[in-house]
Image (cartoon, rainbow, N blue to C red):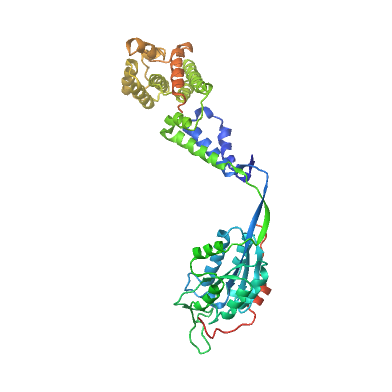
């Protein structure tokens, strides 16, 4: 197994303080759940994979050449946020959505320039066009013919697909362009980036672009360019989906490429799944349904695992009894809190012994709560008497605890079997005295099963000089 983003392992540093503390016995089940959830999330972030051998696949590619109108009129804002910005977004969407193709990009005004030759490197294409600064385009005119002539030289395909992103350019008749494209086998698709209402074009000075007669230029959709697409069996559209479908139907086998493809087996979602399950189990009632959940997915439970949890509770209970007998009431309390069981009678004994420890520590309020929990789970006269006595005590006075609390903790359980109200009221127990209840706890637990980017270059100044060559005025704006 290999980790593709191993840098995320540094997040484990947050667990250093927890490990340094080392008091894991005081952790609750929920706390362990939080820790495991955190661990699995970190592992998922590192992107674990099982590496596979690269497989060589032969791909058949078609050639698509995109020509982008870069003339001054493309800065009109009848298409939000502007025609040129919309053209950039369309180009990016096109090269991402149209797979198994080589793309070439041409920019044109009154003359054309290759922005990118035919390539499969989509990231490079996006960067080159994204780095184009429209503020450096000052040419007020556009020639579709110059773009067609350049595109015809870029591909050796018999019928390469061509996409022109434009507002229709300047011509009122495209018969000449249509004849040229048809002769060269170009399938021309027009993606119109203008509206019939059009828009005026603002200059840097704040004024609007005017024609030779001094009238404000309103650049509109030039539908005359539709003749070009109709003559070459292409589409004339403003819909991106329609353009994409047309390109897919025009696909040809222009280039065969053999590529090495590595398909690694991703493992991160397994760790995400484990993190979610552990979080839910430790914070919700889902732990009651763990067995059914595991069985649903065919997970078999080993009896040794079940015995492990049962034995752990028994050992912790005996340890707590030993601490109490030695007068180590704080340690006894901590150990009792670690005992987990779904058996009501056994749990009642645990709460009863916890209450006795709290009384020894003079924490009468908490002792009262523990006695009440014990009585809620299973009634005994000793616990009832001690609860009444604790209620009458004043915390500022040091009172002697009742003599009844000196009896063995497990005697409660023994007497209950005989009179249904037995048990001593104190923790003066021996290790052997906990054996019968420990066995019950073990049995109950067993029955429950488990309760639980490389350097990128921009266009050179020479490129802008070529784009801006032969400036003309738009005397007949469309």
How far across and how far down the image is residue 127, in percent? Answer: 62, 63
Task: Tell me what residue is drawn at x 64 percent, y 82 percent.
Answer: 470
Query: Which quadrant of the rendered structure holds the N terminus?
Result: top right
- Whether residue 362 appears in this view of the structure is yes
How far across and how far down the image is residue 373, in percent? Answer: 36, 24
**Residue in the foreground of this view, choosing between 230 and 462:** 230
Q: Is residue 209 above or below residue 312?
A: below
**Residue in the foreground of this view, choosing between 230 and 226:** 230
**Residue in the foreground of this view, choosing between 474 and 353:** 474
Task: Tell me what residue is drawn at x 43 percent, y 33 percent.
Answer: 286
How far across and how far down the image is residue 466, in percent? Answer: 66, 76
Residue 96 horizontal side relative to residue 369, left or right: right
How far across and how far down the image is residue 289, in percent? Answer: 43, 31
Q: Is residue 438 above or below residue 368?
A: above
Q: What residue occupies the far top of the structure in this picture?
A: 418
Residue 322 horizontal side relative to residue 122, left or right: left
């Amino acid at each position: 197994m290999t980790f593709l983003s191993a840098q995320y392992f540094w997040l484990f540093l947050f667990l250093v303080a927890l490990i340094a503390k080392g008091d894991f016995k005081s952790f609750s089940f929920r706390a362990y759940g939080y820790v495991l959830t955190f661990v699995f999330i970190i592992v998922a972030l590192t992107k674990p994979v099982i590496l596979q051998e690269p497989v060589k696949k032969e791909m058949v590619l078609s050639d698509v050449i995109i020509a982008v109108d870069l003339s001054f009129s493309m800065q009109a804002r009848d298409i939000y946020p502007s025609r040129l910005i919309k053209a950039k977004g369309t180009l990016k969407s096109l090269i991402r959505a149209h797979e198994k193709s080589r793309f070439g990009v041409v920019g044109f005004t009154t003359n054309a320039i290759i922005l990118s030759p035919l390539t499969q490197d989509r990231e490079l294409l996006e960067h080159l066009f994204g780095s184009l600064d429209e503020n450096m385009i000052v040419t007020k005119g556009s020639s579709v013919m110059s773009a067609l002539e350049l595109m015809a030289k870029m591909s050796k395909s018999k019928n390469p697909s061509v996409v022109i992103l434009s507002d229709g350019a300047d011509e009122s008749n495209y018969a000449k362009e249509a004849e040229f494209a048809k002769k060269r086998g170009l399938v021309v698709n027009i993606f119109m980036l203008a509206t019939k209402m059009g828009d005026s074009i603002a200059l840097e000075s704040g004024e609007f672009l005017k024609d030779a007669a001094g009238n404000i230029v309103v650049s509109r959709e030039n539908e005359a360019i539709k003749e070009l697409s109709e003559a070459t069996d292409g589409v004339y559209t403003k819909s991106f989906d329609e353009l994409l479908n047309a390109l897919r139907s025009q696909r040809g086998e222009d280039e065969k490429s053999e590529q090495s493809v590595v398909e690694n087996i991703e493992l991160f979602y397994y760790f995400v799944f484990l993190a979610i399950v552990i979080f839910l189990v430790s914070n919700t009632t889902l732990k009651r349904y763990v067995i059914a959940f595991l069985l649903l997915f065919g997970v078999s439970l080993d009896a040794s695992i079940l015995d492990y949890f049962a034995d752990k509770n028994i050992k912790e209970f005996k340890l707590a009894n030993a601490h109490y007998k030695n007068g180590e009431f704080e340690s006894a309390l901590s150990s009792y809190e670690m005992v987990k069981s779904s058996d009501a009678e056994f749990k009642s004994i645990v709460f009863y012994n916890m209450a006795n420890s709290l009384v020894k520590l003079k924490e009468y309020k908490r002792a009262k709560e523990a006695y009440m929990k014990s009585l809620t789970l299973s009634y005994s006269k000793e616990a009832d008497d001690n609860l009444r006595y604790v209620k009458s005590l004043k915390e500022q006075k040091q009172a002697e605890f009742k003599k009844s609390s000196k009896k063995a903790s497990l005697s409660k359980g023994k007497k209950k079997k005989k009179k249904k109200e037995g048990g001593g009221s104190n923790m003066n127990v021996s290790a052997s005295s906990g054996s019968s209840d420990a066995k019950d706890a073990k049995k109950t637990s067993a029955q429950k099963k488990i309760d639980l980017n490389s350097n990128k270059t921009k266009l050179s100044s020479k490129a802008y000089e070529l784009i801006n060559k032969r400036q003309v005025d738009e005397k007949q704006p469309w």
